[in-house]
Image: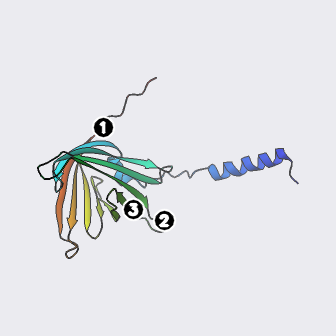
Amino acid sequence: MLSPMRLLLLLFFCSTIFAQTSSKPDDRWAALAFLIGEWTGAGGGGPGQGSGGFSFLPDQDGKILIRKNRANYPASKDLPAFSHTDLMIVYKESAEAKLRAIYFDMEDHVIQYTVAPSADGNSVQFVSENFRLTYRKAGPNSLALKFEIAHPDKPSAYATYIEATAKRNPKPATKN
């Protein structure tokens, strides 16, 4: 039987072995690095002229990216003011090198996306059979985005539903 001290040392030794990380940095988000941060946006389209913001931030020790989005739409002659929130989780498919995403919103939509970054690192498309969301770098701290929808009878005939621009929020100053 192990003494309490030996058991403690064994547990410590085992935990240090499993806690060691690979010396190779994880670059799974390199093609999406231009998206990481917090953003303020404005745009318009099907739901009307709106404003809001979103973030793309690493989570779960950098293994996933989480996008949280909020869009606010003022009242119009046909609709009262409303807000739309959604959550998207971007992840690397474990069996392959492809990036995927899953989207959820307050209207019970769930969308499975394939993530297709451009070779030059300046844009990315989230593509499903009936939806396409494109982010394009428009400057060092600005983005253009487009959300398109295809009718189920014409799955590759996308029509623009929302177009918007976003500015990266400045990082808050740190106190020393």
Quick one: label 2, few (<14), some, or many (20+) residues within 10 Å? few
**Mark 3 and mark 2: span between their CA atoms?**
9 Å
What residue lies at 50% left-to-right and 51% top-to-bottom? Answer: 60
Closer to us: mark 3 or mark 1? Answer: 1
What residue sits right under mark 1 in the picture? 169
Which residue matches tag 3? 99
Residues under numbered marks 2 and 1 in contact, where contact means CB atoms less than 8 Å apart: no
Give percent across and percent down for residue 41.
24, 44
Type of amino acid under label 3: Leu
Label 3 vs 1, first from the N-terminus? 3
The residue pinned by badge 2 equals 94
> Where is residue 7 shown, x and y percent of the image?
80, 49
Q: Which mark is residue 137?
A: none
Q: Which amino acid is tagged 1?
A: Asn
Q: Residue at x 25, y 69 (%)?
A: 130
| Residue contact at pointers 3 and 1, CB within 8 angstroms | no
Considering every residue shown, the one lying at the far left of the view is: 77
